Image (cartoon, grey):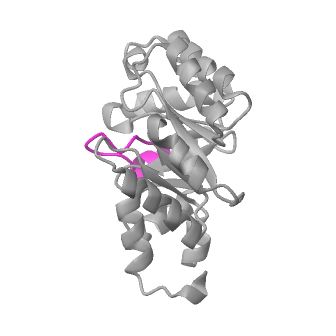
Amino acid sequence: MKRTLKEIARYIDLSCVQANSTIEEIKEAAALAIKYNCICTFALPAHTPILVEALKGYPDIRVGGVVGFPGGGTMSEVKEIEASKLVEMGVDEIDMVINIGHLKAGNEEAVKADIEKVIKGAKGLPVKVILECHHLSNEEIVKACEICVGCGVAFVKTGTGWAPTGATLENVDLMKKTVGDRCEVKAAGGVRDLETIEKMLDLGVTRFGIGVRTAKAIFENTGSNENDY
């Protein structure tokens, strides 16, 4: 099903979460979110207050915070504190990185406890769990999804955008088939064009994490016009 850019914008989380994301790009992300009515924006924790301030007065545009980013190996207690501090800043959603080492070691209880700490720190806000699929086998992706569903997360997410690969048609299809309607799927990392977005929407993805530079190219170089918004 062909969707308008206006419709697609409501599936997009604009992100400025690379190590070299500049303050100006973060401000640009807020401006783009306002212009195109994107659903959410993200920056690294130290820069999140810039988004909170810039998006005051725009209740339809959420601000997200990242926890344990990008490696996932932060101590669970620290992840909980980070989540709670982001809540205090005024974020609306939390994207956390799973403990990849524990997952690959088969230590499911440690993975579960880690997620639960963040859920506690998030104080009722939606939590998305980043699996970083690039580092996982299909079996590990399925196991991670089941753990996440068991913890009651809002979304499972493909990647941080820092790994060599992120979202693929294959891994988002696997994740959606595993979680079904028990939680949602967010695709992030390598989503760079409308064709890919359309295909992933058809597979059941309901949110996309897209860097501000890529999102700007998608919005401004596809023949759209202001009347579409």
Please state, as top left, top right, bottom left or bottom right, where the N terminus lies in the image.
bottom right
Foreground: 132 or 53?
53
Foreground: 114 or 93?
93
How far across and down, in percent of the image, does residue 189 sit?
Answer: 37, 49
- Is there any visible trace of residue 191 in the rendered image? no
Q: Residue at x 49, y 68 (%)?
A: 198
- Which segment did they paint magenta? 158-175
- Is there any visible trace of residue 91 in the rendered image? yes
Q: Quadrant of residue 99?
A: top left
How far across and down, in percent of the image, does residue 216 sit?
Answer: 40, 69
- Dominant SS of magenta comes to loop
Please state, as top left, top right, bottom left or bottom right, where the C terminus lies in the image.
bottom right
Q: Which residue is drawn at 46% across and 10% down?
A: 107
Apparent side of residue 196 relative to residue 30 in the rendered image (left or right)? left
Apparent side of residue 224 relative to residue 55 in the rendered image (left or right)? left
How far across and down, in percent of the image, does residue 150 sit?
Answer: 66, 25
Q: In which quarter of the image is residue 164?
A: top left
Q: With respect to residue 40, does 18 lie above or below?
A: above
Apparent side of residue 2 relative to residue 135 in the rendered image (left or right)? right
The verdict on residue 147 being magenta is: no
Q: With respect to residue 134, does 229 lie above or below?
A: below
Residue that extends furthest to the left in the rendered view of this protein: 164
Q: Which residue is drawn at 61% across and 72% down?
A: 7
Q: Residue at x 58, y 60 (%)?
A: 11
Q: With respect to residue 114, does 135 lie above or below?
A: below
